[in-house]
Image (cartoon, rainbow, N blue to C red):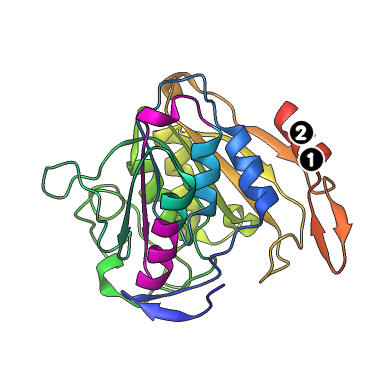
Amino acid sequence: IENGVKNGGHETGEIFTPKEVNTLVARLIDDKREFNVINDPTCGTGSLLYSAYNNLNKKESLLVQGQDINNGIATIAAMNMAIHMDGHYHIQTGDSLINPQHENGKEHALTKYDCVVSNPPFGIKLNNSALDGDDIYGRWGDKIGLKIPSNNIDYAFLLHIVKSMTAEGQGYCILPFSTFSRGKEERDIRKYLIENGKCIKGIIALPVNIFYSTSIPTCIIILDNKNSSKRDSIFMMNAKDEYVKDGKKNTMSEENIKHIVDV
């Protein structure tokens, strides 16, 4: 577990995702579709990325790509993939927001993925001008009409995921639940995602106190580009009571996870 390491323009926060949250995200993925490549732009030690890979069919032909801002942590992720995976993987080091390593061969064009999963660090402040203004990858800025707030860049990670999905790609991002109630600038981003992108398919509110470094309410934002132009509603589930006590922390049992996925 790493806290407060400064690298690439902003501080990295907690990078450890609880096993049961990894399992939940992996089982939420619609694995009936064709998968060629999956990605985690904030992969940490790779636990969430590996869980997603492990839950998909046709693993032998699947390419797994990840990136982390910290070289030491990215090295651990690569080691984990080498030990546990049968397929192909590519783990890079760098800040995914400022210097994404996976481009599709064209200048300033991000690789498109069939599935993107991410548990980005929560509540990072903007202290790099590279995120303040226009964006060469077209994730925010003047052309999009969106500005990343300086006091919290949670939405920068979400917009990065949206831009990294194929035309029928899906994404799963874990963020604080307060993401849906903060400030005017973030309200503009929410409006854009719902009215223009129509890419938010569902939101699942998770129990409090299930992360090791924070007890704040969190949620899983489900993104899906398939048939998004026809989308006229967002599925919302309050799963705050789907937990069991585990000492001072809360955790989700197999029954809790199954109930959420079934619903």
Residue under the image location 23 percent in, 59 percent down = 134
Residue under the image location 83 percent in, 50 percent down = 243
- Residue neighbourhood size for the residue with mark 2, other residues' Cα within 10 Å, grouped as few (<14), some (14–19), many (≥20): some
Q: Position of residue 42 (x, y in %)?
A: 43, 58
Task: Check residue 3 for magenta coloring.
Answer: no
Residue bearing the label numbered 2: 258
Task: Say which element carries label 1.
Answer: helix
Q: Do the residues labelled 1 and 2 touch (CB within 8 Å)?
A: yes
Q: Where is residue 245 in the image (x, y as percent from the top left)?
A: 88, 58
Q: Position of residue 31 (x, y in %)?
A: 52, 25
Question: Can residue 204 be seen here?
Answer: yes
Task: Say which element carries label 2.
Answer: helix
Amino acid type, callout 1: Glu
The part of the chain drawn in magenta is: 56-79
Residue 254 circle label? 1
Question: Can residue 42 be seen here?
Answer: no
Q: Position of residue 2 (x, y in %)?
A: 53, 75
Depicted 189 relative to depicted 202: above or below: below
Residue under the image location 54 percent in, 53 percent down = 47
Amino acid type, callout 2: Lys
Camera-side residue of 258 and 226 = 258
